Image: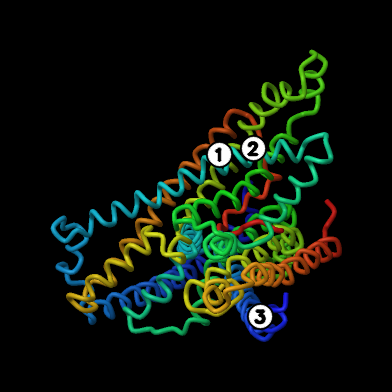
């Protein structure tokens, strides 16, 4: 996939124009950065001493952020495992020959794909207690992520299974394998390989969405930062707020960048081996309820 | 059900907030996304770099974190932004990155001959992009663009965590006020979202059929 070239090789005048444009652009970008730094500096936010708190074990901040990161990853990992397993089950269910399995499974999938993830989490956290089921913030957040992502993953798995050449399936039946054997021995192994990039991309989305825990006060990174800010405000006033927020946000961005790189790596590997990645699946990476209803 | 009817005003207000939030953010995302896509294919390398940086950053940032910086970070450089405009900007800026990617894949799918023909006619970069390539690109990306925008509508729910009284925020707000009918509220909220997403999906489908280019 190469971008069509929309411009000719530039002559001296065009190059000069581009240079001028570049210079003006650079000045503008630098001006914005400078302005932000100036404002921050003016408010005293750049004092090294204020940032030191992030790395000073005596303040308890690195430990707290570390624990928060751990809690974020805990939710992500548990949700990833359950969402993948349930998604696989749902995908197989949706491909079932029996109407009485196919129809309810399809309904479940479409339902959870159609409503915002946050609403699912709210439903678990606020509505279930009215029926006597009280969930912790951890369970509500993980449960919401599982319910939502299993539906999305089910569609990814389904697209993967459907993309396998139908001769494979027929050959399996021709050898006298059962339906379950054809699925587990022939279709799924090949499908898994093909949809791996999309699968990893969706798991990155899941990790991004753990930040929704902030809204129901699960102590993940953002909520932890907010908690620390409130704690420090009590002692020092608004002194360390910006630094703590920036740290929490940057940790989030960093782990996502790393995972995205892993995703791109698996995609390259899958492509290099001459297999085609599944592209039909809903592979957008928007998070928090991506994919059309 | 009675509860829904009694509190119809509340739901209507929340629904309108979600709708206006979605429409405004959609506008921001489409305009900025188009500019970013144009930057990513432009002849000036720094512009390409800048747009790539923007897209990669926003794609790897959870929307909650974008909201967080918008509401709690901006005041640190003396910009205080109200909750609703903050939400519009957060969702819009975030979605713009995805709109840009969708559009860029559309630009890539326009056959190279079109761009070559445009250049052979002596059109400048701006002309060939706006007159030849983008119109065709827009028509091929209707389905993915539609997906992005529908996902965006669902993403507006995050504004509930930042003091915007839109649909999802009804749940935590009414949880104590009404001992009874939380399930009814939940159904109301879900129906509210579907009132926006289902017609949008239908519209996307219609537009897709009308403008699709057969190649």
Pointer 1 with pointer 2, Cβ within 8 A = no
Q: Nearer the viewer, residue A221 or A47?
A: A221
Q: Which residue is mark 3?
A: B11
Give whichever of discs 1 and 2 has the lower sequence position. 2
How far apart marks 2 and 3 lie (CA) works out to 37 Å
Asked which secondary structure carries label 2, the reply is: helix
How far apart marks 3 and 1 lie (CA) works out to 44 Å
Pointer 2 with pointer 3, Cβ within 8 A = no
Q: Which residue is mark 1?
A: A267
Q: Position of residue A158 (x, y in %)?
A: 71, 40
Q: Which mark is in front, 1 or 2?
A: 2
Check the image and report above or below for A213 versus A34. above
Check the image and report above or below for A191 versus A28. above
Specify whether B73 is left or right of B209.
left
> Disc 1 sits on a residue from what chain?
A
Check the image and report above or below for A40 versus A91. below
Asked which secondary structure carries label 1, the reply is: helix
Q: Which residue is mark 2?
A: A88
Q: Which mark is in front, 3 or 1?
A: 3
> Disc 3 sits on a residue from what chain?
B
């Amino acid at each position: 996939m190469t971008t069509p070239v929309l411009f000719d090789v530039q002559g001296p005048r065009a190059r000069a124009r581009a240079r001028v444009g570049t210079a003006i652009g650079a000045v503008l970008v630098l001006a914005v950065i400078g302005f932000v730094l100036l404002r921050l500096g003016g408010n005293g936010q750049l004092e090294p001493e204020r940032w030191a708190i992030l790395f000073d074990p005596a303040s308890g901040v690195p430990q707290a952020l570390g624990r928060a990161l751990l809690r974020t990853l805990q939710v992500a990992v548990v949700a990833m495992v359950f969402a993948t397993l349930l998604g696989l089950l749902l995908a197989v269910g949706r491909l079932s020959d029996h109407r009485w399995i196919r129809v309810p499974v399809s309904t479940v999938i479409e339902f959870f794909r159609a409503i915002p993830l946050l609403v699912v989490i709210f439903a678990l956290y606020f509505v279930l207690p009215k029926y006597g089921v009280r969930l912790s913030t951890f369970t509500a957040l993980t449960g919401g992520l599982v319910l939502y992502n299993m539906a999305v993953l089910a569609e990814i798995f389904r697209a993967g299974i459907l993309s396998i050449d139908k001769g494979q399936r027929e050959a399996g039946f021709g050898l006298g394998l059962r339906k379950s054997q054809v699925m587990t021995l022939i279709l799924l192994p090949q499908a898994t390989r093909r949809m791996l990039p999309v699968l990893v991309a969706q798991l990155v989305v899941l990790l991004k969405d753990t930040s929704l825990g902030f809204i129901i006060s699960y102590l993940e990174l953002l909520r932890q930062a907010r908690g620390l800010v409130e704690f420090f405000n009590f002692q020092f006033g608004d002194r360390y707020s910006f630094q703590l927020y920036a740290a929490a946000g940057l940790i989030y961005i960093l782990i996502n960048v790393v995972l995205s790189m892993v995703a791109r790596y698996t995609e390259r590997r899958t492509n290099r081996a001459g297999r085609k990645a599944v592209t039909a699946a809903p592979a957008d990476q928007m998070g928090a309820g991506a994919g059309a209803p | 059900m009675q509860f829904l009817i009694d509190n119809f005003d509340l739901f209507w207000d929340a629904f309108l907030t979600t709708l206006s939030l979605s429409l405004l953010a959609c506008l921001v995302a489409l305009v900025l996304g188009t500019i970013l896509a144009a930057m990513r294919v432009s002849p000036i390398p720094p512009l390409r770099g800048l747009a790539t940086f923007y897209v990669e950053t926003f794609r790897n940032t959870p929307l909650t974190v974008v909201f967080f910086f918008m509401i709690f970070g901006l005041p640190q450089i003396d910009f205080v932004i109200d909750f609703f405009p903050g939400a519009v900007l957060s969702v819009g800026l975030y979605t713009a990155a995805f709109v840009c990617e969708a559009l860029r894949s559309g630009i890539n799918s326009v056959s190279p001959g079109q761009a070559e023909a445009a250049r052979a006619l002596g059109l400048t970069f701006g002309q060939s992009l706006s007159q030849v390539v983008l119109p065709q690109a827009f028509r091929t990306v209707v389905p993915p663009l539609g997906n992005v925008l529908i996902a965006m509508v669902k993403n507006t729910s995050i504004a509930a965590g930042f003091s915007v009284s839109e649909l999802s925020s009804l749940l935590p707000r009414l949880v104590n006020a009404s001992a009874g009918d939380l399930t009814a509220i939940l159904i109301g909220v879900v129906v509210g979202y579907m009132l926006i997403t289902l017609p949008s999906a239908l519209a996307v489908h219609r537009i897709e059929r009308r403008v699709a280019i057969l190649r």
